[in-house]
């Protein structure tokens, strides 16, 4: 753990389930005070699609 207490990101990765890890893993939960995703999600998607459309599809579907 890097002792980063707040995580804020633009695009959810539906294959990773990191929100579940933060909520259920006591070690991780103890270090992370706030976890917010989807900040500027549309803008993040547009940038991601511009450079890696297949990667964006993977993030949005969880690899299904």
Image (tube, rainbow, N blue to C red):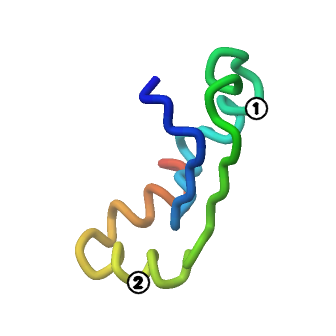
What is the quadrant of residue 26 in the picture?
A: top right
Count every numbered label the image shows and give the total.
2
> Along the line of sight, which residue is nearer the eye, 17 or 26?
26
Which mark is in front, 1 or 2? 1
* The furthest residue to the left: 51
**Tag 1 residue:** 23
State whether residue 51 is above or below residue 11: below
Q: Is residue 59 left or right of residue 54?
A: right
State whether residue 49 is above or below residue 16: below
- Spatial separation of the CA atoms under disc 1 and disc 2: 29 Å
Element carrying mark 1: helix
* The furthest residue to the right: 24
Q: Position of residue 58 (x, y in %)?
A: 44, 56
Between discs 1 and 2, the one toward the N terminus: 1
Question: Which residue is at a point 48% across and 48% down the rendered structure image?
Answer: 63
**Tag 2 residue:** 46
Are the residues tagged 1 and 2 within 8 Å (C-beta)? Answer: no
Element carrying mark 2: helix
Neighbour tally class for label 2: few under 14, some 14-19, many 20 plus, Cα within 10 Å? few
Question: Which residue is at a point 76% across and 32% down the rendered structure image?
Answer: 23
Q: Is residue 46 left or right of residue 39?
A: left
Q: Position of residue 48 (x, y in %)?
A: 35, 73
What is the quadrant of residue 52 in the picture?
A: bottom left
Q: Position of residue 6 (x, y in %)?
A: 59, 47
The mark found on residue 33 in the picture is none
Question: Which residue is at a point 45% across and 76% down the rendered structure image?
Answer: 45
Q: Position of residue 14 (x, y in %)?
A: 58, 50
Neighbour tally class for label 1: few under 14, some 14-19, many 20 plus, Cα within 10 Å? few
């Amino acid at each position: 753990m890097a002792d980063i207490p707040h995580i804020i990101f633009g695009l959810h990765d539906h294959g990773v389930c990191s929100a579940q890890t933060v909520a259920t893993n006591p070690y991780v939960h103890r270090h992370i005070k706030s976890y917010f995703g989807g900040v500027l999600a549309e803008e993040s998607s547009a940038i991601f699609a511009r450079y890696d459309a297949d990667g964006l599809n993977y993030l949005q579907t969880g690899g299904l």
